[in-house]
Amino acid sequence: MTTLIPLCVPFERRKEAARGGATFNGEQKCWMAHRDKLDALLPFVPYRYRPDRKAPYIRPWLVPQALWGFNLRAFLAPEDWKRIRKDAYARSGSYCRVCGGRGPQ
């Protein structure tokens, strides 16, 4: 038996995921694929399931010391931050790019 894993499929690319062999799980409201059939779906696979990625899955970029303790959101206008945040959600299909999980909302 193979394990199904969640995929990070943006709405606009759902047809591409379906052609690659992914199926939509209506109960969990996400795209799923068999772990052993991910070649065509690699752009949508969370990092922890990708064969080309090793832990740690998140690698922080160095931030200049002068910016330690600051949040980008604090420097942007609320409408700009909302646009950036929504764009990031859309690119990942509203799923975590590391684990494939999804929050309560």
Image (cartoon, rainbow, N blue to C red):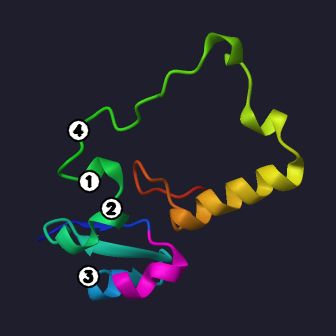
Judge from the rendering whether residue 86 lies leftward or rightward of residue 64; answer left or right. right
The reply to whether discs 3 and 1 touch (Cβ–Cβ < 8 Å) is: no
Q: Is residue 69 above or below residue 53?
A: above
Q: Which residue is mark 1?
A: 49
The structure residue drawn at horizontal position 20% and vertical position 68%, both measured from the top left corner, is: 38
> Cα distance, mark 4 to mark 3?
24 Å
Name which of mark 3 and mark 2 comes first in the sequence. 3
Q: Which residue is mark 3?
A: 20
> Which SS type dominates the magenta stretch?
helix
Nearer to the camera, 2 or 59:
59
What numbered label is drawn on residue 57? none
Report the magenta residues as a range: 9-16
> Cα distance, mark 2 to mark 1?
7 Å
The structure residue drawn at horizontal position 40% and vertical position 76%, both measured from the top left corner, is: 31
Looking at the picture, how far across and down is residue 4, in whole percent?
Answer: 26, 69
Q: Which residue is mark 2?
A: 45
Mark 3 residue element: loop
Look at label 3 and name its amino acid: Gly
Looking at the picture, how far across and down is residue 88, in whole percent?
Answer: 60, 57
